[in-house]
Amino acid sequence: MDIIKVVLADDHVLVRDGIKALLEDQSGIQVIDEASNGKEALEVIRNRKPDLLIVDIRMPEMNGIEVVAEITKNNLGIKALVLSMHDSEEYVVKAIEAGADGYLLKGASKDEFLKAINSIAAGGKYFTGDVSAIIMNHFVSNGNSSSGHNVTKTKKEDPFNLTKREKQILKLVLQLKNNKDIAEELDISRRTAEVHRFNLMKKLEVKNLMELTNKSKEFQLV
């Protein structure tokens, strides 16, 4: 198994040291560099090309959400896990909009932290339970309040011609399932799950979970 190369970005030395200490006995994960602010983080990941950036939100010069947005905008091919003490809807939603692959609170257990890293490195998404609830509440609230006349709106015809399998995949993705979970639930290979997920995102012309959820609600796809 390939080693997951990680860069840490947090303006607190003690936090970075704590994460490194937590990961040092993990043979499949290696912290290759670190940064103390957003601009430094971008410079480091461009030079070191890690598999995963673990980033705090509140940092000097450029915050973590802005860093994630730059990674997404420039197609750097680096996964991003936001590790923060903030569980407010504002931060969570902005992180997802920026393209974060996961959001974990700093109070998470070691086991959950490692699960998040491995899930994201394998191509999935990871949002801790409390954060998942915030995400779904936000989407539901926005869907119900985006316009008053939507309450009695009739179901739109599916313009994307999704197959039965694609609708199954969509439903599971909206439940924040990763590719491994989807493969197990549908009794297919992980590679097949990845292909279905890719084709689904391409067919709906979306780039992230938030866009996917909004379009699913707009056209009532599930």
Image (tube, helix red, strand yellow):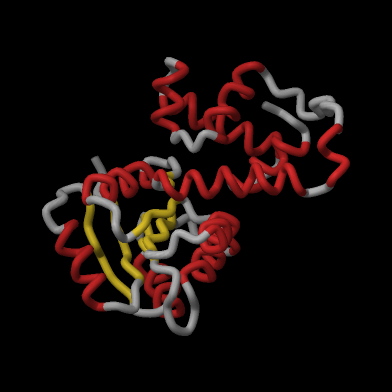
Q: Is residue 69 above or below residue 147?
A: below
Task: Name the spot of residue 177 as percent of width and height, x first.
Answer: 46, 34
Of all residues shown, which one is farthest toward the bottom?
61
* Side of 193 where 207 appears, left or right: right
Residue occupying the point 29% across, 58% down? 107
Residue occupying the point 63% across, 32% down? 200
Work out which quarter of the rendered image holds the C terminus and state it: top right
* Side of 20 where 66 appears, left or right: right
Of all residues shown, which one is farthest toward the left?
25
Count the numbered circles shown. 0
* Side of 97 where 108 appears, left or right: left
Look at the image and tell me whether residue 75 can be seen: no
Task: Name the spot of residue 16 as percent of width and height, x first.
Answer: 25, 70
* Side of 72 where 19 appears, left or right: left
The image quadrant that residue 17 belongs to is: bottom left
Task: Name the spot of residue 76 as percent of width and height, x first.
Answer: 50, 60
The image quadrant that residue 85 belongs to is: bottom left
Q: Is residue 28 above or below residue 80?
A: above
Q: Is residue 44 above or below residue 161?
A: below
The image quadrant that residue 163 belongs to is: top right
Identify which residue, 100 or 1, lies in the foreground.
100
Residue occupying the point 35% across, 71% down? 9
Residue occupying the point 44% across, 32% down? 179
Task: Name the spot of residue 23 as percent of width and height, x first.
Answer: 18, 57
Look at the image and tell me whether residue 78 can be seen: yes
Work out which quarter of the rendered image holds the N terminus and state it: top left
